[in-house]
Image (cartoon, rainbow, N blue to C red):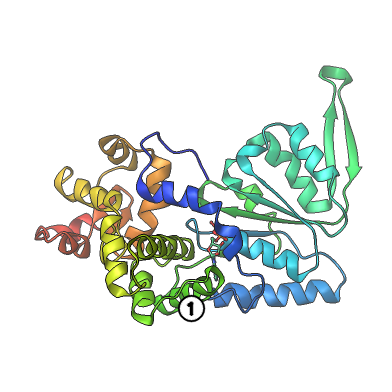
Amino acid sequence: MSSTSPKQNDTAQNNKIDSFLDQELRPTTWDEYVGQKNTKDNLNILLKAAKQRAHPPEHLLFYGPPGLGKTTLAYLIAHHTNSQIKTTSGPAIEKVGDIASILTNLNPGDILFIDEVHRLNKSIEEVLYPAMESGSLNIIIGKGPSARTLQLELPPFTLIAATTRISMISSPLRSRFSGGIYKLEFYSEEEIEKILERSAKILGIKIDKDAAKEIAKRSRQTPRTANYLLRRCRDYAQVHGLDLDEETVEKTLSMLQIDKIGLTRADLTILKTIIEKFGGGPVGLNTLATALSEETGTLEEFNEPYLIQLGFIERTQRGRVATELGYKHLGIEPPADLQKKLI
Ligand code: ADP
């Protein structure tokens, strides 16, 4: 994931560590892939139509906060279409030569998955445009008047890209995702419970229903976080010789300083800072990040989406504002002029 400050906050750190463990729990069939009904329905039609035409599916872009299942979807599509998947990420492609080498090594029907596609630089994007549009690779050889363009035909392939920062994707790049741009949604508690049940089975963890419910409530509506918390509760139960019941979940999560609705210390500090240091806002992202000694990217990518999803903060044109619900969660009386700030 994207670079974060040395003082990475809890959520960012957990996401990073956990992505190494994602693989064993990654769903391998559409039935195991819980939720995201609308995206799944659309993809189903797109994949069927492509199969009938005996052509690789068109290029796809998935976006949404970390851990919602973007990479998993790319792997499922590869599985479903019997394709090889080659994965890379925006920051790993540094030079035009890197992307040229990736593209020329593709076989017909391959899927190229580029994670964190918002971090591709402009010159790489420009190589991708003709590759995505007409399957050709244009490379400029030499410099000055003697420079010439070499054009190579690429095998038919599907580019699947993922991003946590859709606003950073340039419109020329967006317009090349001819198969569509899909937003992944947060999951309901019931969906997270279903994911937890399956994960517990795979990991051989005995967990009772109430315990799964309690973990689901505190999972930020995010499968990766749910799986992470399940493993931490398993560790706690194991070390203390306990059953994994509701009480064990309560003890584990209070040790991890995760509150009743899944907010971490870092989330609460952000909310508190907006309210106490900036009078509830509006406060610009840069100012807020400086006050918290955090990077703007970390706030935007890891903390804000869930705080916004809960309705605790809002993004307005003039900056971030704490809402009535946000004030109430901290037990602070909202100011009388709150509505004006939210416009
Ligand atoms: P992203 O690419 O959006 O950061 P991933 O696809 O890597 O997220 O998902 C993280 C983990 O969460 C996966 O390994 C998987 O275990 C779990 N997961 C994600 N989406 C789902 C889903 N819809 N159903 C079941 N498990 C899921």
Nearest the eye: 35 or 212? 212
State the image coordinates of residue 320 (x, y, percent, origin top left): 29, 50
- Quadrant showing the C terminus: bottom left
Q: Is residue 182 left or right of residue 282?
A: right
Foreground residue, 104 or 145?
104
Residue sitting at x 21%, y 55%: 341
Which residue carries the number 1 mark?
Answer: 194
Ligand 1 neighbours mark 1 (CB distance < 8 Å) = yes
From where the camera sits, is residue 343 visible?
no
Tell which of 38 and 4 is nearer to you: 4
x, y percentage for residue 54? Answer: 88, 70
Task: Give above or below for 313 relative to 221.
Answer: above
Residue at 90% in and 42% down: 152
Residue 301 or residue 142, whichever sits in front:
301
**Image quadrant where residue 293 sits:** top left
Q: Residue at x 34, y 38 (%)?
A: 294
110 left or right of 31 in image:
right
Q: Amino acid at mark 1?
A: Lys
